[in-house]
């Protein structure tokens, strides 16, 4: 899941993760509040409570996009479709939030009209994080297997953390 994060950045060693937490979210909009609570408790536990506002805004946007575009209510889903999952991973100098959903459709940043009530989510993600991106994810249960079929995607945002003094 982390391989695309290496592009254009110093290497991230998956074994050097100093903290990680994952939460599965139900396919309803109330899940956004749950994602924010999960983010608050995780960041507080990691001593990063001062980063909550920016990270929570990005988490809210990524989860909302997954619910709105990857799990629309009017499209039937197979029972085996993986749910939306929020992953938070911390290194000494970086924090990554990643949202996995069952859609293979790429996220599209578009320019919203001034009077539009939505459509600015990825602009906010770009504005509040240091970088963001997405990639297809392997079929759950076969991660790490070479040649695994693709299913779903992961949209991630990276935050640089100040080095400890």
Image (spheres, rainbow, N blue to C red):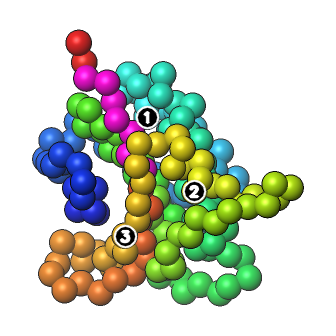
* Residue 158 falls within the magenta-colored stretch: yes
Q: Which residues are magenta?
A: 157-163
- In this rendering, the answer to whether 145 lies above or below 115 is below
Cα distance between the residues tagged 3 and 2: 15 Å
Task: Where is residue 135? Give x, y as percent.
Answer: 37, 70
Residue 93 position in % (x across, y down)? 26, 32
Q: Which residue is outermost to the right?
A: 115
> Which residue is label 1 attached to?
42
Quick check: 130 above or below 41?
Answer: below
89 relative position to 12: left or right = right
Front residue of 133 and 16: 133
- The residue pinned by badge 2 equals 122
Distance CA(mark 3)–CA(mark 1): 24 Å
Quadrant location, the C terminus: top left
* 85 relative position to 53: left or right: left
Residue drawn where x is 38% and y is 46% of the image: 158
Distance from the alpha carbon under mark 2 to that under mark 1? 23 Å
Residue shown at 24% from the left, 54% from the top: 8
Residue marked by disc 3 = 135
Q: Is residue 155 above or below residue 40?
A: below
| 10 Å crowding of disc 3: few (<14), some (14-19), many (20+) | many
Image depth: mark 2 or mark 1 in front? 2
> Toward which corner of the image does residue 111 lie, by quadrant?
bottom right
């Amino acid at each position: 899941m982390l391989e695309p994060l290496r592009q254009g950045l110093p290497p991230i060693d998956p074994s050097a993760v100093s903290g990680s937490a994952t939460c599965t979210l139900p396919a309803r909009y109330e899940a956004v509040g749950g994602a924010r609570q999960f983010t608050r408790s995780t960041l507080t536990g990691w001593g990063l409570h001062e980063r909550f506002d920016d990270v929570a805004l990005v988490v809210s946007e990524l989860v909302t996009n997954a619910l709105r575009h990857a799990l629309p209510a009017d499209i039937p889903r197979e029972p085996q479709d993986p749910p939306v999952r929020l992953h938070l991973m911390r290194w000494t100098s970086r924090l990554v939030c990643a949202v996995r959903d069952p859609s293979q459709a790429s996220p599209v940043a578009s320019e919203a009209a001034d009077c539009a009530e939505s459509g600015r989510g990825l602009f906010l993600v770009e504005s509040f994080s240091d970088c963001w991106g997405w990639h297809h994810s392997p079929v759950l249960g076969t991660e790490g297997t070479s040649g695994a079929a693709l299913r779903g995607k992961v949209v991630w945002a990276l935050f640089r953390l100040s080095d400890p003094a």
